[in-house]
Amino acid sequence: MELVNAETASALEEVVGRYRADPESVYHTWFLGEDRLKAFRIIRRGIQTVVEDIFRGVFPCDYRGSSLEFVMAAVTEQKQVFQGAAHAFYWKPKLRIPDIYEHRENQLGFARFLDEAFKAGREDQILDAIHRLDGLKIKGMGPAAANLLYFLHPTLMPPFNTAILNGFNALTGSTLKLGSWRDYLVMREGIQALNRRFADRFSKDLGAVSGFLFDLGIGKISMDSNVETALAFEEKKLRKTLEKRHQEVLDDAKESSLHARMQAHLMKVGQALGYQVWIARNDRQAPNCHDGGRLGEGALTTLPPLGLSSEVLNTVELIDVLWLHESRVVSAFEVEKSTSIYSGILRLQDLSQSLSDLGPSLFLIAPDGREGEVRAQLLRPAFRQLANRPALITFTDLEAHCDALCRFGSDQTVLDRIARRF
């Protein structure tokens, strides 16, 4: 599928270059981030839970409270590209769509689609699963599930939303529609062709090229030299878009600073108690508020052998803070300022259930205002029976008592003084 002719090739080269160079592009603010990689295992596990719940007949008649809601929460926290991805799955009772909550056969068809896609090892198997789902003609069930497919097969299936489609249509002069699997597959072929053309600028992971189309679609970048296919945006609307992205970047920086501050407190306490400390590999360059250096300085550079599979180890290396003693993890901490509490619990459980011993003490570090959310998550049936359930330490308590914990503590049990268990 040829996307552009020779006349527009140079304009396309220029705009792809701008996308890669712009520090506020999706490429830099989402695609290159370790948080994106964290989400893959969580979402894959969540999809398995959705399939199991449907097959067992325990999937509810509403989106709210379902395992699908928690999967989509992990998807939508992936910043710009997936903002609003959950809306298509909301149960709309007046329209009775999407009809996967009250119609058992449709529900099973959706589960089979997810199960087949999860287990697929080849492209044709994924496409067959899509065609079978499309053939069911489930009312209100369009290609929104493509966003789940991306997290199962990122080198084969791009995400799908209005902005990405608008960017693709603007680039190619197409008139593809949002609610059609056929149009999604046509767009997918075009995206793959674009990705091959710029193999040295994008990635095998289709998130990079999809982010480019997203930024085209919202007007963040435009093909100024290509008048026929360039997006036409009102100046006021474009300025508002750019200001929103800039504010998102500033908010992310502020959140990262607070996140690093909590990690620094945990590092200080852990080392004062005599433990070795691991800092998540993606956070090692963050500033340490206690000594002016970097969090990675003074922390373990590699984890000792823990007897974990490579897949689990990749997840464990992204846990925010670990305390270790004699090559054994004694405490694990996930700092959750605004990201999904559900995702944090699953990462901690991945570690705990993969270790041969009784497992470490698990802690969620969260703002005071999220205590109710933590409580609600830990009381979910999926977590209620866990032998090793995380405790909550609030930002306020950790900050206020950091020095006292260092001074008066002898081991990890000192955290029980400020931890809240449900």
Image: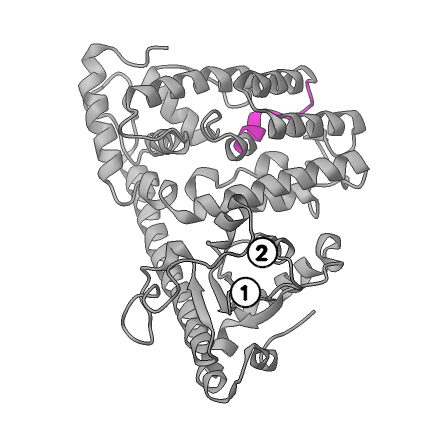
Mark 1 closeness class: few <14, some 14–19, many ≥20 residues within 10 Å: many
Residue 350 location (% of width, % of height): 60, 52
Q: Which residue is mark 1?
A: 329
Q: Nearer the viewer, residue 274 or 52?
A: 274
Alpha-carbon span between mark 1 and mark 2: 9 Å
Residue 202 to residue 73: above or below: above
Q: Nearer the viewer, residue 127 or 281?
A: 281
Residue 75 appears in the rendering:
no
Whether residues under marks 1 and 2 lie with C-beta atoms below 8 angstroms apart, the answer is yes
Q: Quadrant of the C terminus?
A: bottom right
Q: Which residue is mark 2?
A: 351
Pair 1/2: label in front: 1
Judge left or right: residue 26 versus residue 74.
Answer: left
The residue at 63%/20% (across/down) is 129
Q: Which residues are magenta?
A: 137-147
Q: Which callout, 1 or 2, points at the residue further toward the start of the chain? A: 1
Identity of the amino acid at label 1?
Val
Q: Secondary structure at mark 1?
A: strand
Judge left or right: residue 387 versus residue 257.
Answer: right
